[in-house]
């Protein structure tokens, strides 16, 4: 990354792209979901990770971190999952950051695959610790592990074939030069 690239200011275009990505993550999390009766907290499988991964891969770590942290934490706040919001902000923000970081440095399919698998590890570890803290029990969080795996695997199955074409398309449409 060059010094000029690092010094680039946050433009109106950046703001609009980031806000749109946050809104897409929020919408996909809120409206395309399935509540599961298997976990202590009711469990939730949603497709919010689809626009998260695509945005992070197309636009990089800042957009990935913002849309993951703000989009999914906003869902928690407005959907009655308020105690989860700070954890979601950090966990999903980190997931988006990692996918975006890989995309900035290695914009190849293998990097997308590796970074989304790292995002899965972040999600599993982060929410396991989160549930352990919230419930004061380190056994109960094991019940949500299968749902978290399904959630990310479904997102990966949907996004992997779209990642490279979407990256090229979005960057061409937005004339994105980050």
Image (tube, helix red, strand yellow):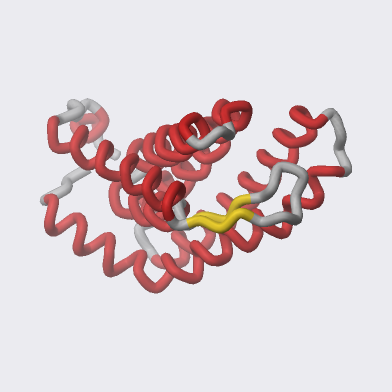
Q: Is residue 93 visible?
A: no
Q: Residue at x 66, y 56 (%)?
A: 36
Left or right: 138, with 111 as reference point: right
Give 153 or 115, whichever is nearer the viewer.
153
Q: Residue at x 56, y 33 (%)?
A: 80
Q: Residue at x 86, y 38 (%)?
A: 138
Task: Say which quadrant the C terminus sits in.
Answer: top left
Left or right: 105, with 118 as reference point: left
Where is residue 51 drawn, in percent x and y? 37, 54
Give 99 or 156, whichever is nearer the viewer.
156
Where is residue 114 drawn, in percent x and y? 53, 60
Q: Is residue 88 visible?
A: yes
Number of marks drawn:
0
Left or right: 18, with 16 as reference point: right
Q: Quadrant of residue 67?
A: top left
125 versus 165 height, above or below: above
Left or right: 85, with 147 as reference point: left
Q: Residue furthest bottom?
A: 161
Q: Residue at x 71, y 42 (%)?
A: 41
Where is residue 74 drawn, in percent x and y? 44, 33
178 versus 38 height, above or below: above
Task: Say which quadrant the N terminus sits in.
Answer: top left
Give 169 or 37, whichever is nearer the viewer.
37
Where is residue 62 drawn, in percent x and y? 35, 36
């Amino acid at each position: 990354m060059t010094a000029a690239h690092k010094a680039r200011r946050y433009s109106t275009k950046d703001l609009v792209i980031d806000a749109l990505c946050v809104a897409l993550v929020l919408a996909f999390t809120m409206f395309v979901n399935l509540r599961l009766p298997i976990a202590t907290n009711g469990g939730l499988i949603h497709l919010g990770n689809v626009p998260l991964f695509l945005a992070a891969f197309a636009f990089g770590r800042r957009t990935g971190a913002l849309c993951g942290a703000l989009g999914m934490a906003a869902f928690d706040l407005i959907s009655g999952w308020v105690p989860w919001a700070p954890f979601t902000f950090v966990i999903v923000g980190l997931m988006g950051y990692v996918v975006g970081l890989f995309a900035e440095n290695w914009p190849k399919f293998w990097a997308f695959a590796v970074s989304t698998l790292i995002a899965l590890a972040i999600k599993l570890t982060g929410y396991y610790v989160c549930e352990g803290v919230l419930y004061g029990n380190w056994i109960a969080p094991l019940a949500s592990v299968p749902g978290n795996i399904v959630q990310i695997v479904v997102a990966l199955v949907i996004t992997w074939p779209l990642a490279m074409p979407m990256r090229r398309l979005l960057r061409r449409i937005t004339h994105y030069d980050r």
